[in-house]
Image: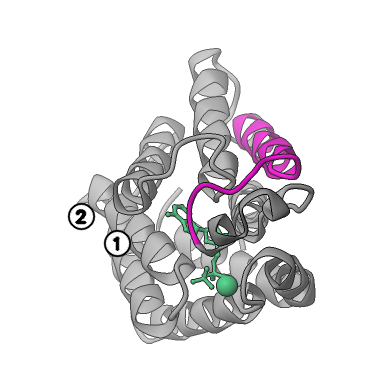
């Protein structure tokens, strides 16, 4: 995996957010302010544009540029959260030109660490952590069990989707949805939903390189 993997990942995310924009808007309209789909589309559209203007940088640098772009283009909570996630993720790779599955797991773990540091959410708070943390754990476990990176990523994407669905019965304890208290129960968290899309996009980017 290399810089092209990161570029392909960001393009896959961009396509997934466009395809699911209305769904993400609906989910956020139910327990938030209805901007999550437009936030994510605006952010990742800007990311793909920023990367197009920056050909030739190493993969870690591309992640840092992507994170910085999200912070500067997305107003909602998801902008700073995913922005610091990708910047932290990029730092793991330094100036390396290539990376392997184990390093990719550390990249995603660093992203999770940034989200938890900034947002102070734990598993079960009905946030993007509920999709990202199971994905990181599944990726690490499968790689430790000597599965290939593509097989491990498929398991990570499934774990993220399971975590996403598991947010439905939860009461939100962080973010805008927490203002609803018990009325947040019975709805799938929008940020966990877009996070599951982001992990699925990574699986596609790694499995079918452009
Ligand atoms: P906003 O809530 O500012 O309108 P978005 O609608 O773009 O921002 O994003 C909402 C999502 O952000 C939520 O569904 C949740 O997953 C995530 N989120 C909000 N606050 C936190 C937090 N403190 N930690 C982790 N994720 C959070
Ligand atoms: Mg919102």
Up-down: is 7 above or below 92?
below
The residue sitting at 67% across, 37% down in the picture is: 163
Residue 165 drawn in magenta: yes
How far across and down, in percent of the image, does residue 193 sit?
68, 55
How far across and down, in percent of the image, does residue 192 sit?
62, 51
In this view, the residue farthest toward the left is 95
Residue 97 in view: no
> Which label is found at residue 11?
none
The residue sitting at 61% across, 37% down in the picture is: 153
How far across and down, in percent of the image, does residue 27 sit?
74, 65
> Which label is found at residue 95?
2
Task: Report the span colored magenta.
Answer: 152-175
Q: Is residue 129 left or right of residue 183?
A: left
Q: Crowdedness of circle 1 by 10 Å Cα count: few (<14), some, many (20+)?
A: many
Q: Which residue is mark 1?
A: 58
Q: Nearer the viewer, residue 4 or 31?
A: 31
| Quadrant in which the C terminus is drawn | bottom right
Q: Earlier in the sequence, mark 1 or mark 2?
A: 1
Q: Quadrant of residue 121?
A: top left
User: Disc 1 vs disc 2: Cβ atoms closer than 8 Å?
Assistant: yes
**How far apart, in angstroms, are the residues tagged by discs 1 and 2?**
6 Å
Helix or strand or loop: what does disc 1 sit on? Answer: loop
Q: Quadrant of residue 130?
A: top right
- Mark 1 CB lies closer than 8 A to ligand 1: no
Q: Is residue 67 left or right of residue 198?
A: left
Residue 110 drawn in magenta: no
Up-down: is 193 above or below 38?
above
Q: Nearer the viewer, residue 47 or 55?
A: 47
Q: Is residue 153 left or right of residue 30?
A: left
The colour scheme is one colour
């Amino acid at each position: 995996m290399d810089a092209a993997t990161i570029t392909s990942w960001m393009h896959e995310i961009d396509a997934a957010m466009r395809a699911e924009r209305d769904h993400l808007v609906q989910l956020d309209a139910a327990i938030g302010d209805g901007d999550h789909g437009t936030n994510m589309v605006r952010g990742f559209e800007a990311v793909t544009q920023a990367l197009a203007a920056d050909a030739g940088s190493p993969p870690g640098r591309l992640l840092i540029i992507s994170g910085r772009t999200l912070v500067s283009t997305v107003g909602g909570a998801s902008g700073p959260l995913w922005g610091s996630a990708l910047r932290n993720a990029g730092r793991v790779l330094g100036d390396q030109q290539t990376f392997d599955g184990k390093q990719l797991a550390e990249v995603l773990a660093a992203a999770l660490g940034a989200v938890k540091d900034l947002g102070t959410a734990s598993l079960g708070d009905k946030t993007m952590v509920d999709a990202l943390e199971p994905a990181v754990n599944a990726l690490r476990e499968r790689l430790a069990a000597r599965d290939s990176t593509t097989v491990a990523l498929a398991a990570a994407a499934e774990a993220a989707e399971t975590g996403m669905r598991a947010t439905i019965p939860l009461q939100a304890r962080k973010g805008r949805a927490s203002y609803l208290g018990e009325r947040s129960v019975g709805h799938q968290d929008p940020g966990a939903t877009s996070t599951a899309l982001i992990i699925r996009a990574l699986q596609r980017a790694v499995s079918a390189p452009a």
